[in-house]
Each structure stands twice: as C-alpha cells, then as structure tokens.
Amino acid sequence: MKPPVFYALSSLILVTVLTSPIHAAPPSVTTAIDQFVAKVFPKASHYFWVVNDTQTESQHEMIVDINTFVTNKDGEDIPIENRFLLLVLNGEVLAAQKIPLNAHVDCGKDTEI
C-alpha cells in the first residue's frame, strides 16, 4: 500500500500539469494555404489544392507553387482551376500572385548575373 503522501503529490502534479497554460503553435504552411484559398474563394462550396513545387528561402520563408480546384455554390459540379505563387513567411501567406496554368515557374533561388 502506498503512503498518502504519494497520492497527494501525484494529485498536485496532475493538477499543475492540467492547469498550466498551453501555448498555441504558429500555423503551419498547410494551414496558411488553406486559409488563403478559403479567403480568395469565399463562395466556394468545395475546394482542394495541390502543391506543384516549393522553395525554402530560410527557416521561416517559403515560396509555394499551388493549383487550386474550386467548386462554386451555384450548383455547377465542374471545378475551376487556378494557379498561384505564394510567399509564406512565419506560417502566413504574405504575398500571392496568380499565374497562368501552363506557365513554367522556377521556384529556385535567385542568382546574380
């Protein structure tokens, strides 16, 4: 049989752990992309997106080439396809550019000439 002090300490540790504040992690790249697509297409009934290419500039900065497929609420079942280049910085889309669907995009690092 365990002494009552063990149960008291166990309860105190459990209460301390459960009541400690939990810090939210910064949003991930996938969350940032999903929020971007939802904001750009607010009238969409369904959407999904596909990452074509990415380039990591630094630990907190990434360039993402995505295709989006959006079905509008007006009843059409044919998804509309769009393509974007996104600059994601610290888990947020800082800039976006719509590009042609068949464009050749090089997400590589810039080189000086």
Image: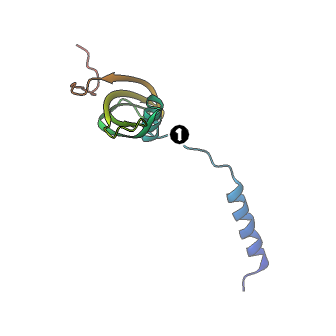
- Whole-percent x and y of residue 78? 31, 38
Residue at 25% x, 27% y is 101
Query: Is 86 displayed left or right of 100 in the figure?
Result: right
Residue at 43% x, 31% y is 41
Residue 7 image-quadrant placement: bottom right
- Whole-percent x and y of residue 109? 29, 25
Farthest residue to the front: give it.
75
Query: Is 82 displayed left or right of 41 in the figure?
Result: left
Farthest residue to the bottom: give it.
1
Query: Is 56 displayed left or right of 36 in the figure?
Result: left
Residue 83 image-quadrant placement: top left
Residue 55 image-quadrant placement: top left
Q: Nearer the viewer, residue 49 or 112?
A: 49
Does dot 1 land on a helix, a strand or a loop?
A: loop
Q: Nearer the viewer, residue 57 or 97?
A: 97
Total residue callouts: 1
Colouring mode (rainbow / by chain / secondary structure / one colour): rainbow
Q: How dense is the environment of label 1, judged by Cα within 10 Å: few (below 14), some, or many (20 and up)?
A: few
Residue on which disc 1 sits:
26
Q: As shown in the figure, which amino acid type bears the numbered disc 1? A: Pro
Residue at 71% x, 55% y is 19
**Image quadrant where one finds the C terminus:** top left
